[in-house]
Image (spheres, rainbow, N blue to C red):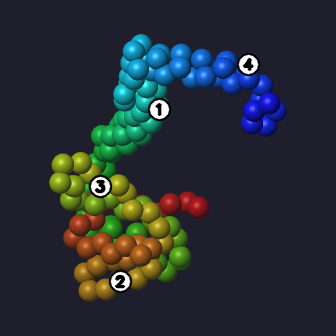
Amino acid sequence: MGIAGETHMDSKANSAAFLRAKDFFEKTYRDRGMVKWQGFYLSDHVEDVAKYTEKTAEVEARTAMPRMDEMEIDHILTHAYANHEVVRVQRIHCDELGHLTPMVQGKVTGYWENNIYIGNEMIAFDDINWCECVNA
């Protein structure tokens, strides 16, 4: 008997199997390289493309609200500040690609010089195009 109860015949059979496998990998088998990983790449890629497409559609769907005058904006923001109401604000300026920035929503938490704080975000009063109180 050989190692761990192995018989002489088992040893020859294992050796022959190893030789066949070695011969197969040396002469017949062709590694497909990165091709074998495409299935994994494809699912991640599809997910990323879907997220990008959704975000792009959301950005392009933003529409400019009608321009409000400063008195109207001041009235809405002062009311929201005094009554702890949530507001939604659209800025005038666009991002570097010319798209409207997302609306800022939150409670008016304070004023400083010519700026207003909505949540933790500071917005220049001159940069506000439109605002409204949001019914919570």
Tell which tag, 3 or 2, sits nearer the viewer: 3
What residue is disc 1 on? Answer: 40
Q: Amino acid at mark 3?
A: Thr
Q: Amino acid at mark 4?
A: Met
Residue 118 is left or right of residue 93, and the answer is right
What residue is disc 2 on? Answer: 111
Give the percent coordinates (x, y) of residue 84.
53, 76
Distance (Cα) linking label 4 and label 3: 77 Å
Tell which tag, 4 or 1, sits nearer the viewer: 4
Q: Amino acid at mark 2?
A: Tyr
Tell which tag, 2 or 1, sits nearer the viewer: 1
For the residue pair 28 and 23, the one nearer the viewer reads as: 23
Q: Residue at x 29, y 55 (%)?
A: 101
Give the percent coordinates (x, y) of residue 65.
31, 50
Q: Are marks 4 and 1 in contact (CB under 8 Å)?
A: no
Distance (Cα) linking label 2 and label 1: 51 Å
Mark 4 Cα shell of 10 Å, populated few (<14), some (14-19), many (≥20): few
What residue is disc 3 on? Answer: 101
Tell which tag, 1 or 3, sits nearer the viewer: 1
For the residue pair 71 and 77, the one nearer the viewer reads as: 77
Q: Amino acid at mark 1?
A: Phe
> Could you say whether the residue bearing mark 2 is in a helix, strand or loop?
strand
Quadrant into which the C terminus falls:
bottom right
What residue is disc 4 on? Answer: 9
> Could you say whether the residue bearing mark 1 is in a helix, strand or loop?
helix
Q: Residue at x 57, y 23 (%)?
A: 18
- Give the mark, 3 or 2, whose residue is nearer the N terminus: 3
- Give the mark, 4 or 1, whose residue is nearer the N terminus: 4
Distance (Cα) linking label 4 and label 1: 43 Å
What is the count of numbered marks?
4
On screen, residue 77 above or below 31? below
